[in-house]
Amino acid sequence: MFMPVPVYSFSGAVRQEGFRMASLGKKALILTGKNSARQSGALQDVLTVLHENAVETCLFEDITENPTVDSVAAAAAFGRREQADFVIGIGGGSPMDAAKAAAYLMASPERQPSDLYTAGEDNHLPLALIPTTCGTGSEVTAVSVLTRPEKQTKKSISHKIFADLAFIDGAYLSSAPLSVLRHTALDAFTHCVESYLNTQADDFSRMYAREGLRLWQENRSVLETAEADAGCFQQMMNASAMAGMAIAQTGTGIPHALSYALTYHLHIPHGKAVGYFTVGFLQEAGERSCRGVLQQAGFSSLQEFREWYRALYGIPEVPKNLLESAVESLLANPAKLRTAPFPTNRTVLRMIAENLLNET
């Protein structure tokens, strides 16, 4: 079991414990998107704490959803010009994943964007991560997923980069739109499911997955009604972190691998795209496994989960040729196929990918 990130998870975590970021360096490159870091108050909290501790900052706010390698390279180049010596990522999975990759590039002046996908040393600048959504768990994983336009997909970089500090404050979730809560929380749910059923799972990773599902189901109604208090938001972010701790040990599985084609080509939000394939994945996993993880999340059956997904997310229209392409791409990834708890072949993957959500 290895998850080396010190995590501070409570209301006011940055304001109370953020002084610890001052030990990471003298000037911080802060990576964010355009909205959530400011709207949630997380950016202001970070700036206040750093300035109180005489740490300089430079801000890069151009991280878009599903960031590309080029955007990360631009952020790293900006950080080098500003002579930043550590990195802070604030936001959802996109800014946090971008911050990991930028911290890697900035650790050596010789590193080029192509090195992100070349095996080698994983050393990076010191890194702190602050989530503002309840889905990716990137603050506690070593994974950085970037968009690669030349390959028309998303792919994890070749380097394992854990943060040096993570701060989780449910208050930052209170300004998130309901659509963001739904899409990111579904991602956390799928992390738990894919990790729990993963062939690499053990007692420790399943412990985190079970606890993530327990917290998730206790607050599932927030996704349906948008009614929540501060305690609910904290638990939702903790569920995401638990799910992240689980996949930090096992990695994700087949639904995530299939989902990237939908996100890249159809711009379907990541959580919704992964959820699209989760029904078929659970069906192939078998009744015993399926019932266990669904009950932990508060669903009595696969059909109930199917109907819940339909009601909250709808059924995206996905061209059959795109599904075929996603299946063929996955077939070329034997390491990912080995994570499935059932035998896989082209027929099985097609059954997962094609039209299962439309069954009655």
Image (cartoon, rainbow, N blue to C red):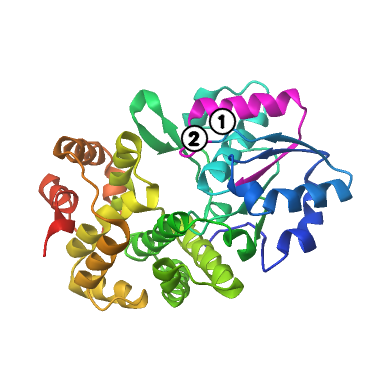
Is residue 274 positioned above or below 237 on the image?
above
The amino acid type, in three-letter code, at marker 1 is: Val
Residue at the spot 58% in from the left edge and 58% down from the top edge = 175
From the top left corner, tell me how far across and down residue 40 is, in percent. 64, 54
From the top left corner, tell me how far across and down residue 286 is, in percent. 18, 68
Secondary structure of the residue carrying tag 2 is loop
Q: Residue 280 versus residue 207: which sits nearer the camera? A: 280
Q: Quadrant of residue 109?
A: top right
Span highlighted in magenta in the image = 64-90
List the residue tagged with mark 1.
Answer: 72
Residue at the spot 43% in from the left edge and 55% down from the top edge = 179
Which corner quadrant holds the C terminus? Answer: bottom left
Q: Image check: 356 left or right of 50?
A: left
Q: Are marks 2 and 1 in contact (CB under 8 Å)?
A: yes
List the residue tagged with mark 2.
Answer: 67
Residue at the spot 38% in from the left edge and 46% down from the top edge = 269
